[in-house]
Image (tube, rainbow, N blue to C red):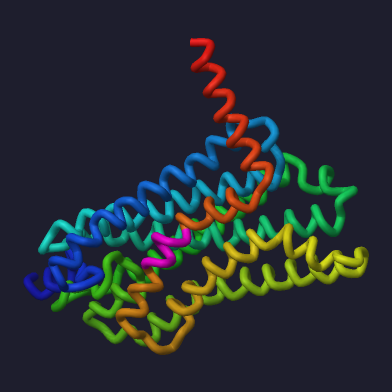
Amino acid sequence: MEEANESVASWFIFRGLCDSRELQTFLLLPFSTLYLMTVVGNLFVVLLFITDPHLHSPMYFLLANLSFVDFCLSSVTTPKLTTDFLKDNKTISFGGCMTQIFGIHFFGGGEMVLLVTMAYDRYVAICKPLHYSSIMDRRKCIWLVLISWTTGFLHAMSQQVMILDVPFCGSRIVDSFFCDTPLVIKLACIDTHTLGMFINANSGVLATVCFILLVISYTYILLTVRLHSKDGASKALSTCTSHITVVLLFFGPCFLIYLWPFSITWMDKFLAVFYTVITPLMNPAIYTLRNKDIRNAIKRLINQHMNSQDNF
């Protein structure tokens, strides 16, 4: 009975970003600020889409969904990271650890497919403008978003199934600031080399397939527009720059985390911070700063608020 109990982990300990107590105290304010900006930025984009009729189009419907996914993805890890800066003993329950793993892969996998959907939307808008409204109708947009959420759910469940019955014993220390499948299986009592390959392949295949579809989509957009316009390449690049930037920011860390054969602890932690903290913050900033319609929507919201204040 004692032997059986040793293989059942009830909690884990995070090593965190660093060992220095002073540095952790220093990092508390910056990371808290970054998370607050992520929440405000992403939920503000969602609010703009809901309240402004001018943004009720397929592209902004997908963008609002992306912002909501980014808010959720950051919320899986960042609040725990910031509160742990104040603690010497950074523990998490087994259930909490499994919840983090599910959340990261659910929202991360969903975002990959959502980015492909946004690329498809741009392809139809640029390459088939006369048929855009009939192809990207409301019903199809909803179905495409549901497919992205369903894919994320299935991906997360597959990760969960592979690790849920793995026996853990001995060390409970996770050398990071959050639970992810490749990190947790290192603490297993059994040889997990083959399981680790399946886990990385599961994430790697999804990321690779989505990235290939994105490359094909944007390449086809640039080539098509260039053939039909003298300065088509620059116009297409201007239209898709925000999307391409977000794709590179999101998929770069994913490939290095799940497909890079060599693991360097400090680099893995940096990529994890970039993936879960920085990218969700930058996405709304990139779209807001480069998008004229969203800037105009912000002006309308401000003017509406000022008018209501004057009437009051």
Q: Assign the N terminus to one quadrant of the image.
A: bottom left
- Where is 145 relative to 305, above or below? below
Q: Is residue 223 left or right of residue 169?
A: right
The residue range painted magenta reads 273-279
Please tell me whether residue 182 is drawn above or below residue 74 in the rendered image. Answer: below
Residue that appears at 54% across and 58% down: 111
Image x and y of residue 253, in percent? 47, 73
Pick the residue in front: 221 or 145: 221
- Is residue 271 in the magenta section? no
Nearest the eye: 93 or 236: 236
Residue visible at 43% across and 83% down in the picture: 197
Residue 281 percent across, percent down from the top left: 45, 55
Specify whether 309 is left or right of 237: left
Q: Nearer the viewer, residue 102 or 118?
A: 118
Kindly report the secondary structure that dominates the magenta region of the rendered protein: helix
Residue 82, quarter of the rendered image: bottom left
In the picture as drawn, the residue positioned furthest to the left comes out as: 2
Q: Residue at x 26, y 54 (%)?
A: 29
Is 276 in the magenta?
Answer: yes
- The answer to which image quadrant residue 81 occupies is bottom left
The x and y percentages for residue 7 are 17, 73
Question: Residue 193: image x %, image y %?
Answer: 36, 87
**Residue at the outermost front position:** 310
